[in-house]
Image: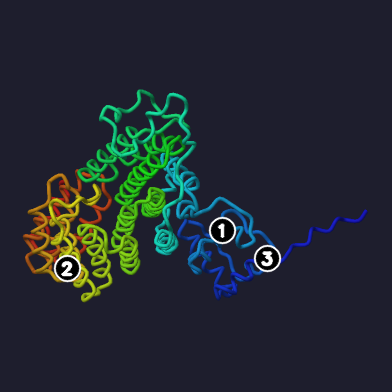
């Protein structure tokens, strides 16, 4: 009996064409796939022979097709899937970094992220931050337009005429914002302006908790709220006006979920939330809020030391809103660009950005109509950003002056921001040779950090302690260490 020959593999011409376009060697592609795997804790060990086999038609195992697609996405600057490379589809390792093609797809991606995060997927909080993952979403947002239609099944049912958005866009009476008396919403129900008012109120509550107690305090509750309340609303029934506002409220809560993830050092997860918040803001038709999401992404890049990406994100935000944005928004965008330039050590560019930020804030008037999300950007916040810039440039006198001003002006409600500023002031005092004052400020910050659930707060204190190392034998430093040990 003749044995049946195995089916002939078909050479993968799509992969070959992309390898040529990217300018990779087979060994170079294998090395990049291995490096990307390491970011996700995978020990892959591919080599040029592996790539030769893929080109001959062999299918790589597991999530490797998604990793290969991400390598090409980074190199070529456009989103590519496994299928685009002639490979079998698989679960994407990079789920959440996609900038959805439609509002319906955006709902699917972000709700999948909420569901995974609200469960016990601790590996989700270990995903690495990837600077290259910022390129495609920010570009797609910049060149993209608001979606033509976001309404879902918006034909009013008989007798349901009063539940859609008022033509004037004004909110209904406050009683409509009272949450329904049930555990979860059911998908498909009609969304009202009262529902959206409730989402906004919840956002304010979680924002207040985050400022005072750190992102770890109520992050999981926020994610569960998004899963059980926001997702059914997004899959509900609404007209255009209500739909835009719903996407705007969902974008705000998703950005906040990213911010709280960032505060507990879940940086890859935070990055995914920011990308999805950016896409939801586009569905809302809110360019200004999209620029704010990019500012948040830029701040994370600054914190992680990626100055070049931070500057690029700030500039994309500036281009996206144009010169017609309110002065206070312009001020924020320039201040964040200054932070990125400071990380890079670009003194002249940083000074120019700081000057633009200061002029823009001076041009703002108390009666100006500004978005709710920009209200935190005031003289105290600008002084805080300037203090950080001068610290990074080792301009200690200026850093101390701006940090002191920020602490004088900043409300006690912003406890974590005050802690950060106190550490910056301590670093400046250290740079000026004022060791006792520096240690006193550091001890205050350490005491505040002990009351919070914020990895960033702890990291600020640790950074200060690293700067104390050259003075470890001084009496003031020994006293500082005893105080902190007692905490």
Residue 145 percent across, percent down from the top left: 42, 56
Front position in the image: 135 or 288:
288
How dense is the environment of label 1, judged by Cα within 10 Å: few (below 14), some, or many (20 and up)?
Answer: many
Figure coloring: rainbow
Tags 3 and 1 touching, CB below 8 Å = no
Q: Which is more N-terminal, label 1 or label 3? A: 3
Q: Which is more N-terminal, label 1 or label 2? A: 1
Report helix, strand or loop for mark 2.
helix
Q: Is residue 41 left or right of residue 215?
A: right
Is residue 463 among what the camera can see? yes
Q: Which residue is mark 1?
A: 81
Q: Is residue 118 left or right of residue 76?
A: left
Front position in the image: 147 or 355:
147
How dense is the environment of label 2, judged by Cα within 10 Å: few (below 14), some, or many (20 and up)?
Answer: many
Quadrant in which residue 141 is drawn: bottom left
Q: Which residue is mark 3?
A: 12
Q: Which residue is mark 2?
A: 390
Mark 2 or 1, which is nearer the eye?
1
What whole-number distance in Å separates the C-alpha atoms at marks 2 and 1? 43 Å
What whole-number distance in Å separates the C-alpha atoms at marks 3 and 1? 15 Å
Report helix, strand or loop for mark 3.
loop
Q: Is residue 392 left or right of residue 271?
A: left
Residue 207 percent across, percent down from the top left: 25, 43
Q: Is residue 253 left or right of residue 114?
A: left
What whole-number distance in Å separates the C-alpha atoms at marks 3 and 2? 53 Å
């Amino acid at each position: 009996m003749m044995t049946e020959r195995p089916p002939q593999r078909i050479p993968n011409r799509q992969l070959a064409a992309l390898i040529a376009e990217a300018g990779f060697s087979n060994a170079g592609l294998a090395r990049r796939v291995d490096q990307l795997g390491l970011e996700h804790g995978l020990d892959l060990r591919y080599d040029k022979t592996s790539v030769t086999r893929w080109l001959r038609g062999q299918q790589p195992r597991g999530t490797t097709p998604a990793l290969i697609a991400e390598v090409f996405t980074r190199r070529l600057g456009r989103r590519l899937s496994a299928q685009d490379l002639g490979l079998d589809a698989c679960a994407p390792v990079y789920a959440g970094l996609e900038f959805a093609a439609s509002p319906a797809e955006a709902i699917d991606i972000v709700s999948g992220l909420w569901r995974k995060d609200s469960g016990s997927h601790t590996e989700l909080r270990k995903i690495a931050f990837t600077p290259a993952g910022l390129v495609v979403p920010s570009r797609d947002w910049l060149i993209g337009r608001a979606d033509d239609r976001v309404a879902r099944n918006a034909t009013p049912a008989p007798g349901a005429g009063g539940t859609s958005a008022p033509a004037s866009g004004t909110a209904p009476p406050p009683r409509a914002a009272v949450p329904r008396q049930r555990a979860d919403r059911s998908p498909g129900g009609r969304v009202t302006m009262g529902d959206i008012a409730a989402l906004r109120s919840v956002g304010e509550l979680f924002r207040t908790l985050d400022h005072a107690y750190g992102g770890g305090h109520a992050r999981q509750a926020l994610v569960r709220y998004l899963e059980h309340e926001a997702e059914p609303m997004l899959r509900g029934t609404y007209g255009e006006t209500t739909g835009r506002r719903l996407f705007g409220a969902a974008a705000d809560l998703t950005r906040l979920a990213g911010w709280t993830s960032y505060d507990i050092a879940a940086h890859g997860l935070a990055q995914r939330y920011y990308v999805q918040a950016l896409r939801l803001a586009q569905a809302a038709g809110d360019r200004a809020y999209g620029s704010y999401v990019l500012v948040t992404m830029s701040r994370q890049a600054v914190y992680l030391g990626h100055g070049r990406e931070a500057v690029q994100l700030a500039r994309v935000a500036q281009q996206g809103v144009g010169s017609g944005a309110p002065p206070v928004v312009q001020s924020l965008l320039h201040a964040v660009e200054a932070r990125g330039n400071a990380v890079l050590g670009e003194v002249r560019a940083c000074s120019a950005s700081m000057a633009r930020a200061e002029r823009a804030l001076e041009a703002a008037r108390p009666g100006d109509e500004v978005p709710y999300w920009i209200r935190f950007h005031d003289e105290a916040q600008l002084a805080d950003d300037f203090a950080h810039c001068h610290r990074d440039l080792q301009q200690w006198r200026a850093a101390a002056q701006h940090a002191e001003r920020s602490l004088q002006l900043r409300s006690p409600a912003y406890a974590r921001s005050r802690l950060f500023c106190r550490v910056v002031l301590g670093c400046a005092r250290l740079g000026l040779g004022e060791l006792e004052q520096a240690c006193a400020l550091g001890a205050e910050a350490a005491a505040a950090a002990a009351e919070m659930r914020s990895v960033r707060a702890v990291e600020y204190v640790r950074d200060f302690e690293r700067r104390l190392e050259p003075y470890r034998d001084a009496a003031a430093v020994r006293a500082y260490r005893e105080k902190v040990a007692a905490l």
